[in-house]
Image: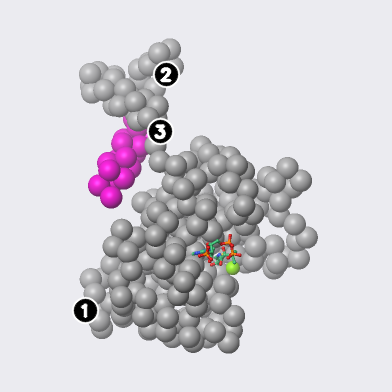
Amino acid sequence: MFRSLLFAPGDSEKKMLKASNVGADCVILDLEDSVVESRKPIAREMVTEFLKQGGNPEVSYFVRINPLDSGKFLQDLAAVVPAGPAGIVFPKSNGVQEALVIGNYIEVLEVEHGLTTDSVRLLPLVSETPTAIFTMGEYKDGPARMMGLTWGAEDLGAAVGASANLQSNKDWTSPYQMTRALCLFAAHAAKVQAIDTVMADFRDLDRLKVVCNEGRRDGFTGKICIHPAQVEVINEAYSPSSEELNHARAVIKAFAENPEAGTLQIEGKMIDKPHLVLAERVLAFAAELANK
Ligand code: COA
Ligand code: MG
């Protein structure tokens, strides 16, 4: 599971290197929106070369390819997949059929280049067009390689001509609150990681902390970001706190000691099956972090 996923423009050797050494669980080497048209070919070469050199072994490298209607995604995949990225970020996905198509192309390349089938994971960006909003429930039938779902507000806002996506108090406006919630539930319906979107105002780390805590509260387990300074805040917020770990252990202990009971109480609060599931999830994630 990734807490922090940091974007680095694929045409900047400097940023790809720097992004590798700031504690991000995943670095997304970008071939899409952060690279201008004229630099797409050089970015593709630079990202491929960067992957071949291996980068930081502690980091999982994903590559964001160009979208299906760009006429570039096949060249992107053909160049980068043989270099063995941990995954592909698929932007402007308009439903599960498109994610399946991308998955099939990746599989051909895995077979051709002797990589294990489904070893290259897939992270679709599921909210970047108006059409996409009506497809999110479909991802429960997504490809096995799909490891998460994430969403974006910027392209969607541009597509509908929205003049802003944040309210004056910096909360999302209602169309983006809805989009965020749809992505959250779509990811859980698909049993993959729900990954919250970027906070563009990268200097405001106090606000980032609030947003991360809200995301975690709601069921997101990680967040994409665009600036190295955001990584530490995200990692901290998305790691289980000692209180959460203690509570999770207490829940598991209570059920273990009362194997016949479906419902119990801890300190005057009712707990039942969903609490046990959540406690197990918290401890499994803590164990995963400890093994990193
Ligand atoms: N990855 C790696 N390094 C980054 C970085 C990133 N995403 N964002 C900033 N840095 C580096 C800068 O190069 C600079 O390095 P230096 O101190 O060695 O010169 C340092 O961090 C501080 O950067 P800062 O001056 O605060 O910001 P900036 O003006 O250089 O960059 C952005 C601001 C938004 C252009 C930059 O953060 C960026 O490119 N982000 C990623 C954009 C992207 O990939 N978008 C696509 C997804 S939405
Ligand atoms: Mg975009």
Label 1 vs 2, first from the N-terminus: 1
Label 3 vs 1, first from the N-terminus: 1
Identify the disc placed on residue 270. Answer: 2
Is there CB contact under 8 Å for labels 1 and 2?
Answer: no
**Helix, strand, or loop for circle 2?**
strand
How far apart are labels 1 and 2 at the CA level? 52 Å
How far apart are labels 3 and 1 at the CA level? 41 Å
Q: Is residue 143 visible?
A: no
Horizontal arrangement in the rendering, residue 271 relative to residue 183 (left or right): left
Which residue position is annotated with label 3?
241
Label 3 vs 2, first from the N-terminus: 3
The residue drawn where x is 69% and y is 62% is 157
Query: Looking at the image, is 140 positioned above or below residue 71?
Result: above
Which region of the structure is painted magenta?
274-292
Picture quadrant of ligand 2: bottom right
Query: Looking at the image, is 45 positioned above or below residue 280?
Result: below
The residue drawn where x is 51% and y is 71% is 9
Residue 281 in the magenta stretch? The answer is yes
Q: Position of residue 91 (x, y in %)?
A: 52, 69
* Residue type at the position of mark 3: Ser
Q: Residues within 10 Å of mark 3 (few under 14, many from 20)?
A: few
Could you say which is closer to the camera, residue 286 or residue 269? 286
* Residue type at the position of mark 1: Gly
Location of residue 83 by image quarter: bottom left
Q: Position of residue 231 (x, y in %)?
A: 47, 52
Which residue position is annotated with label 1?
114
Q: Can you tell me whether the CB of the residue at mark 1 lies under 8 Å from the nearest atom of ligand 1? A: no
Query: Looking at the image, is 163 positioned above or below residue 74?
Result: above
The residue drawn where x is 44% and y is 63% is 19
**Helix, strand, or loop for circle 1?**
loop
